[in-house]
Image: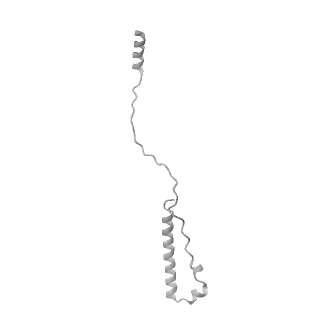
C-alpha cells in the first residue's frame, strides 16, 4: 500500500500544470445573401425612343431637354441598380 501511495505522489510531481484560458475570438464567415430586389430594366436608349424624322423635327431647345432627360434616366437607373444589387 505504501508503494502505491509513494508511486502516486512521485507521478503527481511529474505532471505539468495545465493553464487553461478562455479566449474570445471573432471569426468572419461569408454568407451568401439574396439580392434586395430584382434587377431593374435597362434604360431605353434615345435612338429607340425617338425615330430620326421626329428628332429632326425638334427644335434645339427640345433636343437639349430630351438629352438632359435621358441623362437623368440613366443616372436614376444606375442608382436603382446599385440599390437592388447592394446586398448580393
Q: Identify the residue shown where x is 57% and y is 80%.
A: 49
Q: Is residue 5 left or right of residue 31?
A: left
Q: Identify the residue shown where x is 55% and y is 74%.
A: 43
Q: Identify the residue shown where x is 51% and y is 81%.
A: 67
Where 42 sits versus 25, above or below? below
Assign the N terminus to one quadrant of the image: top left
Q: Is residue 53 left or right of residue 78?
A: right
Q: Is residue 69 left or right of residue 9?
A: right
Q: Identify the residue shown where x is 51% and y is 67%.
A: 81
Color theme of the render = one colour
Where 53 sits versus 21, above or below? below
Q: Residue 19 location in percent, x, y?
A: 39, 31
Q: Residue 26 location in percent, x, y?
A: 42, 46
Q: Residue 2 location in percent, x, y?
A: 40, 9
Q: Quadrant of residue 51?
A: bottom right
Q: How many marks?
A: 0
Q: Residue 80 location in percent, x, y?
A: 49, 68
Depth check, front residue: 59 or 49 = 49
The residue most toward the top is: 2
Amino acid at each position: 500500500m505504501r508503494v502505491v501511495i509513494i508511486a502516486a505522489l512521485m507521478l503527481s510531481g511529474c505532471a505539468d500544470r495545465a493553464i487553461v484560458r478562455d479566449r474570445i475570438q471573432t471569426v468572419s464567415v461569408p454568407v451568401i445573401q439574396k439580392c434586395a430586389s430584382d434587377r431593374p430594366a435597362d434604360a431605353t436608349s434615345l435612338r429607340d425612343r425617338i425615330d430620326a424624322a421626329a428628332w429632326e423635327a425638334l427644335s434645339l431647345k427640345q433636343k437639349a431637354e430630351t438629352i438632359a432627360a435621358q441623362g437623368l434616366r440613366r443616372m436614376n437607373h444606375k442608382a436603382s441598380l446599385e440599390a437592388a444589387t447592394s446586398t448580393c
